[in-house]
Amino acid sequence: MLKSLTIENYALIDSLHVEWNEHLNIITGETGAGKSILLGALGLLLGAKNEGAATKDISKNCVIEAQFGIEGYGLESFFEENDLDYEQEITIRRIITPAGKSRSFVGDIPVQLTTLKELGSHLVDIHSQHQNLILSSEEFRISTLDSIAQNGSILEEYTTLLSKLSKLRAEYRKMAQDMESARKDEEWLRYTVEELRAAKLKENEQSETEQKLAILESADNINEALTALRNSLDDEELGAIIALSRSERELSSLGERYPEGRSIAQRLKSVVAELKDISATAADEVEKLDADPETLQKLSDRLNTIYSLELKHRAESYDDLLMKFKGFETRLATIDNSDTALKELKTRIDGVEAECHTAAERLHNSRKAVCTVLERHIIDTLNQLGMADAKFIVEITKTEEFTELGTDSVAYLFTANPTTKPAAVERIASGGELSRIMLAIKSLLARRMQLPTVIFDEIDTGVSGRIADAMGSIIASLAEDLQIIDITHLPQVASKSGAHFVVYKEEGRTNIRPLTKSERVDEIAKMLSGSEITDAARKQAKILLG
């Protein structure tokens, strides 16, 4: 429950601090005093977006802080999942800078706004007078049934399945579109793949062929060079090998007379062996070089084929051509396997659809089971609120398509007149009737959801007299089990037992303070008679206050 609220530098609020009663808290005040500002600050604390300039003094931060008692509300797992320190009392703080930047804290730990908003949804439910219009939202009508039936786990299962189904359907559409697009080019693609396969392209073939062709085209010059080399090495009179061999023998024969000559002879022997090897290699190369026209033509034709394919397919290199070839083969294989792939994907989709139908059916049955609970509660509450002839019916029909909330369409049918056929509540109910219906729904939800704190912002709009007193009694009875903060303009509601606060303006600034017993008499009397409090109004106020 909300224990205290501190606001600094927000809108028309300079600084205020409120300690709340754990049961019923009544807030009254003149129109324009700033009650909505108070709720706006609390909304920011609970994760609402900062739509405008929150700071009153642009030289200081806006700070909103509240203490909550959370013992017994089962929030331990939430704190563990979000790496927060769980304590029986927690402090939530939100700071908004003059530049509009926001920082949020649970205890001393910074948190994201989404985390703050999720935590806030477990702590406080704020119902404003404008929320009566939410009855026109089918999402709200379905969510009400889900809350009463406690369908959280079933709905989570269904939502997970629906997300999976949506992804599979999107994958199927894309695959089908790709197949359709690919089939338009299938004839060209098959021809291209067959042409490239017939070319029998190999890794590094272009560079190797270019090198072979370059050698053969220069065969005459190479032969001349190699022949000249062999002549200079092997000539019987002037060849280097003959001359060096002779010198090697002469130096070796000097023997003991010239020891250094033996060393030189050994080195010459090595040189002669190397030169003989070079000569043999040159001879082998000459035999290999066969620059016949047929071989040259084959190599040239092969390169022309490769160059032509590169040009045709706009390949930047031979490797790029091979890569494109693989891509064409992949596309063709996809086309060839498309029917099988689409069929397999369709089978998966059918399976998930069946699971979605099963989960949606569970939701439908669960919602159907609590319709009577909601109908009886609302009719009983409306009877207490002076609508003895009211009829309220929850109508559930199935839809063909999956929606985010299942396959149900839910309507609330209502009539306050026994001679009038029930119709959609958002079309037939008056403002006062909507207020009573919403109070009935909220009172049931508050108990079922076990929310620590419920805030009613003029939920009694459109009622007065005996009905207002009955609404006040219902709100007071709720406060026996929950913490209720009720903003009201009705003295019949404001007089119910609990803490009473008045919101007022002083020098253009919004303030709030608790009322003493005597001050409360005057406040209720003012609500009865206007700005001039009469003795009769005070007497009536005392009667209302018991």
Image (cartoon, helix red, strand yellow):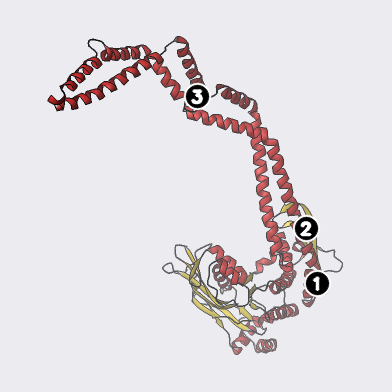
| Res 108 visible | yes
Residue at numbered disc 2: 361
Residue 21, compared with residue 346, is above or below; it is below
- The kind of secondary structure element at disc 2 is helix
In front: 333, or 536?
Answer: 333
Gap in Å between the C-alphas at discs 1 and 3? Answer: 80 Å
Residue 220, compared with residue 337, is above or below; it is above
Residue at image x 53%, y 67%? 83
Gap in Å between the C-alphas at discs 1 and 2? Answer: 24 Å
Q: Position of residue 380 (x, y in %)?
A: 79, 75
Camera-near label (1 vs 3) is 3
Q: Amino acid at mark 3?
A: Glu
Residue at numbered disc 1: 376
Camera-near label (2 vs 3) is 3
Residue at numbered disc 3: 310
Camera-near label (1 vs 2) is 2
Q: Is residue 124 left or right of residue 254?
A: right
Examine the image and state in which quarter residue 4 appears.
bottom right
Q: Amino acid at mark 1?
A: Arg
In front: 12, or 410?
Answer: 410
In front: 245, or 356?
Answer: 245
Q: Position of residue 247 (x, y in %)?
A: 19, 18
Residue 365, compared with residue 464, is above or below; it is above
State the quadrant of the C terminus: bottom right
- The kind of secondary structure element at disc 3 is helix
Q: Amino acid at mark 2?
A: Glu
Mark before the other along the chain sequence, 1 or 2 = 2
Q: Is residue 164 left or right of residue 400?
A: left
State the quadrant of the N terminus: bottom right
